[in-house]
Amino acid sequence: MENQAILRFRRLGVLTIFAVYFVILVGGIVRASGAGMGCPDWPTCFGQWIPPTNESQLPANYHEIYAKLGYENTNFNPLKTWTEYTNRLVGVTIGFLIFLTAWSSRIFLKTDKTVFYLALSSFFLVGFQGWLGSTVVASNLKPFMITLHMLLALFIVALLIYTIARSQQQFLSRIDITLLPVKFKTVLIAAMLMTLLQIAMGTQVREAVDFIAHEHAYIDRKFWREDFPIIFYVHRSFSSIILFTNVWLVWKIYQSAKQGNNSSENSLLSRTGFLLAGLVGTAIIAGISLDRLGMPAIAQPIHLLMANLIFGVQFFLFICVKYAGKVGSHQIS
């Protein structure tokens, strides 16, 4: 019975992690499409719990109403409105999922209280994230607030990954890392820090792109590149260092798996390594398309999602390496 409860907790936690990544993707679509003010109020949308599908469903003077509230030039666009509304619905869904995850984590109060408190902290952080989302709307989409909102989502998903991994530490402790280089963990930490730095630079590029997009009224994307700041070129060049570092990590995992045993624990490490390679490759392809193909809208949220997934996978690898070989420990610090 207890094993079923642990399995239920793990499944809920993994589902919540995927949901958070999905809302990051949807948020990227909202930002790339300029749909952030598709709903100029919060928590309602144009004063309704279910937004309208046609401008005729709004008051004739709705432009004046929202101008008085500080949102000038508010024009109803059903596509942008429902894109933003979908973003909110996904956020609410995450709220329910994280509540269920926190509730199911109570089974660890007897064995590892930290798992319970971490899950509970995630629940409160998701609530804070919801409030921050309303502040983003109230700020009329200030770039700093949007970036803060995204970084908090990155922190929440990292916290969830650690919580779920910690609950499975007995399984992860059986991973054999004796064939990995001694410096593997150090390089992995460096790769994580580089990814965070790359994300930080990416947010600055994103803020500049938001300004450029507004100046071009979200059209003529092929001309946006002419106005890119210097940080864009630093961000682009730095990706090559990230590529080679992650390729080294994946290659060492592959070599150790080839020479070692084929246990389910070590297979997990190998699959995670291959996933990391795929994510890095996809992120770079998306970045190249942004640079060379006139900033296609679909590439922006994909590029953002890949960056967040890369850090998440690197962080999970770090936890695996941290727990590996610690068999018999019920509470690993």
Image (spheres, rainbow, N blue to C red):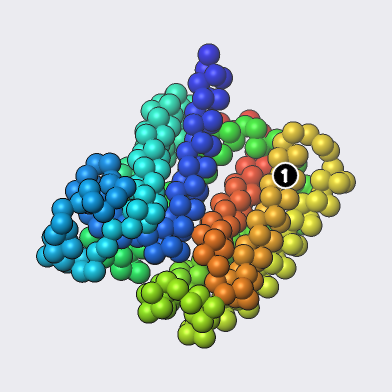
Residue type, numbered disc 1: Arg
Taking the spot 70% from the left edge, 55% from the top edge, the residue there is 278
Task: Tell me which residue sits at (57%, 53%) in the image.
Answer: 309
Badge 1 element? helix
Mark 1 closeness class: few <14, some 14–19, many ≥20 residues within 10 Å: some
In-front residue for pair 289/182: 289
Q: Position of residue 10 (x, y in %)?
A: 53, 31
Where residue 224 sits in the image (x, y, percent)? 49, 80
Residue found at the very far right of the displayed protein:
259
> Can I make out residue 162 in this image?
no
Q: Is residue 116 above or below residue 187?
A: above
| Left or right side of 10 for 145 | left
Q: Left or right? Give the position of 27 relative to 192.
A: left
Residue matched to label 1: 271
Q: Is residue 248 visible?
A: yes
Residue at (36% x, 42% y) in the render:
89
| Residue 295 or residue 177, whichever sits in front | 295
Q: Residue at image x 64%, y 45%?
A: 320
Query: 10 above or below 238?
Result: above
Q: Nearer the viewer, residue 146 or 246?
A: 146
> Residue 332's x, y, as percent?
55, 39
Q: Give residue 310's quadrant in the image.
A: bottom right
Question: What is the tally of numbered marks visible in this picture?
Answer: 1
Q: Is residue 267 above or below residue 194?
A: above
Q: On the image, which quarter does residue 144 sit in?
A: bottom left
Extreme residue in the top direction: 1
How far from the left and from the top, in percent, is residue 24?
46, 53
User: For this view, does 312 lie left or right of residue 26?
Assistant: right
